[in-house]
Amino acid sequence: MVVRLGEVAIGSIGYWARSWDGHEVYETGYAIFSEFGGHGYATAALRLVASRAALRATRRHLHAFPRVDHAASNAVCRRAGFELVGTSSFEYPKGTWAESNDWRMDLTGLV
């Protein structure tokens, strides 16, 4: 989904179903154009997408996997209410492996 500020597209966010660590979960990914960073737009978008995922009521957790060295994305997860559950070697894009943080939000209390 496109993240907008009025009529201006400022980034994107989405979520999808996946299997992770033996559980059926949702994963999210997001990006805000750098000129709009630092204003809370990514945090607001992440909270909104978590609420939408919770409404589906088919999976308990929403995960995000920012690289451990991406301070801004990790701060977004923290501010949005995710808990840091560990690190993992994560493939994204396909064929590229990096050490990522595993942030998780429990969706059961959001609706």
Image: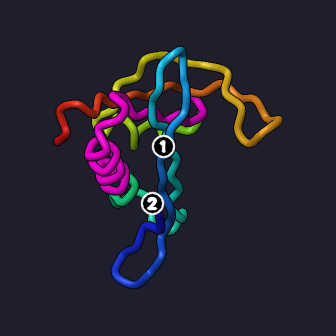
Residue 44, labelled with which disc?
A: none
Which amino acid type is marked by label 1?
A: Thr
Residue on which the image places disc 1: 28
* 67 magenta-colored: yes
Going by the image, does 89 lie left or right of 58? right
Do residues under tags 1 and 2 come within 8 Å of each other at their CB atoms?
no
Residue 40 figure quarter: bottom left
Residue on which the image places disc 2: 37
Q: Position of residue 26 (x, y in %)?
A: 45, 36
- Density class for disc 2 (Cα within 10 Å; few <14, some 14-19, many ≥20) is some
| Residue pictured at 83% horizontal, 35% vertical | 95
Of pointers 1 and 2, the one earlier in the residue sequence: 1
| Residue pictured at 78% horizontal, 39% vertical | 94
- Range of magenta residues: 43-68
Which amino acid type is marked by label 2?
A: Gly
> 72 above or below 105?
below
Q: Secondary structure at mark 2?
A: loop
